[in-house]
Image (tube, rainbow, N blue to C red):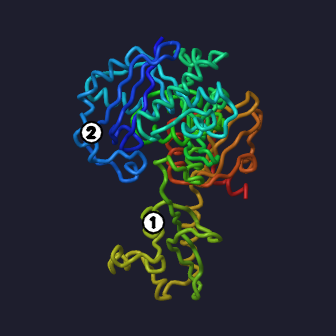
Amino acid sequence: MQYAIVDIETTGSYAAASGITEISIQVLDEEGIVMDRFESLVNPVQQIPGYIQALTGISNEMVEQAPLFEAIAAEVYQLLQDRVFVAHSVNFDYSFVKSQLSYCGYELDTHKLCTVRLSRKILPGHASYSLGRLCEALGITHSNKHRAGGDADATVTLFQLLLKNDTEQHILRSLKRTSKEQALPPNVPRSEFEQLPYTPGVYYFHDDKGKIVYVGKAKNIRYRVSSHFSNNSTGRQKQNFMRHVYHISYEECGTELMAAVKESTEIKRLWPRFNASQKRREDLYGIISYEDQNGYLRLGVDKTVRGKVLLNSFHHMEGAKASLRQLVQEYELCPRLCFIGEALYDEKMHRLLCRGACEKREAPDVYNSRVLQAVAQLENLPSFAIVDKGIHHDEKSCILVWKGSFYGMGFIPGDLQIERPEQLREEVTPYRENSTITNMLFAYAKRYPSKIIRFEPANLAESH
């Protein structure tokens, strides 16, 4: 078995949009003796950012006359193919090299070893496993830092030390096809991955300070988390995961639908750094009712704020206005008393609908009776529960939609006899609703009617 110790310098942090500026490869035999060495600057065909020039010392002028990667691709491929690809934080270097080789027509497919993960196992107890800090702690000479050759030299010495001290054969076990060791981010303990269940739920990726940076849902938590790290994606998200994920936690949810609901609420609550979807602010609008100084009940549309009671809720202003316009027409309410603009209801429409309330020609009690009928219709929005399997055999999962909006979810006893809807409100945990969840639940209820318990409006009135 032979090893190829690789280090590269790049123009950015992820391979899909960045280039290689320098590469160093040292080939070692199974005893760790250096057999061959290759090193070259590379023209990345793009500008090197100023901060990277300052870090590496590699300027645009230095790489201007350097070979393009395609000019050295064949030699790089010959050095790497059929050898174990070794690097400090291997997935970063591997993603760049594989991407560049693929562009040139070479498909790299080799075993990988990460000296960060191996060092944590074979040389435990160090405060930091960055290459510089680890070399300093171990007394390894590390000159010409942040250059491919200097970092590769230090990694070679470190790997030789790992080979010498690997009494428990961590290197051999990591090279087995069934091992997930090199697929995981360098800083994630394998024990945290091994504890992940094969059940539906949500999973959380944490950074080095414990802050949640990504939330995901899964039908099978273990498989889904593994899929994040088991491919060689060159995109931004994959590379950011690899560099910033230090811990994984999870919460079982019973069903895939519960996991999807939980994911949506957690994204809105936590606003994780690497979640892209569902991260938008949602204002809630609704129809309000109050009595004016002349005794007439008035309806209008307003944004929800703490302490304000809405007759119903919408995630878009236009939805609330459309509902109000429908009520005005259906119950012949005065458009002016419902704040319907003249642009939508001209004088002809106003004369058709209004019976004179705005001019006090219709008595308040007569007009208000129709307003109360309209309000009653708003309160008769559908309520239902989605009941499915739970985590444990003696329970069921329950997601409750109350008067057209997601109310909450949780687990109920498997033998619970639901005699009144209010029982479920007492059993489930309330959650904050959003349009993603509401749309998801109504679509699910339509698709799987056998899992739905529907409540009649009369039952809901009795439950207050």
Q: Quadrant of residue 222?
A: top right
Compared across the picture, whether 36 is left or right of 112 comes to left
Q: Which mark is residue 415?
A: none
> Which residue occupies the foreground of this view, 398 or 12?
12
Q: Which mark is residue 43?
A: 2
Q: Residues within 10 Å of mark 2 (few under 14, many from 20)?
A: many
Q: Quadrant of residue 102?
A: top left
Residue depicted at 48% across the width and 56% down the height: 280
**Circle 1 sits in a helix, a strand or a loop, which is it?**
helix
**Circle 2 sits in a helix, a strand or a loop, which is it?**
loop
Q: Amino acid at mark 1?
A: Met
Instruction: Say above or below: 342 vs 51.
Output: below
Q: Residues within 10 Å of mark 1 (few under 14, many from 20)?
A: some
C-alpha distance separating marks 2 and 1: 54 Å
Residue depicted at 41% across the width and 33% down the height: 149
The answer to whether residue 203 is seen in the rendering is: no
Compared across the picture, whether 169 is left or right of 273 comes to right
Q: List x then y, in percent, for residue 294.
A: 57, 88
Mark 2 against mark 1, which lies toward the viewer? 2
Mark 2 or mark 1, earlier in chain: 2
Instruction: Say above or below: 121 vs 368.
Output: above
> Which residue occupies the foreground of this view, 134 or 183?
134
> Which residue occupies the foreground of this view, 31 or 463?
31
Q: List x then y, in percent, for residue 448.
A: 54, 35
Compared across the picture, whether 290 is left or right of 320 comes to right
Label 1, on which residue?
Answer: 317
Q: Amino acid at mark 2?
A: Asn
> Which residue occupies the foreground of this view, 3 or 395?
3
Q: Are marks 2 and 1 in contact (CB under 8 Å)?
A: no
The answer to whether residue 38 is seen in the rendering is: yes
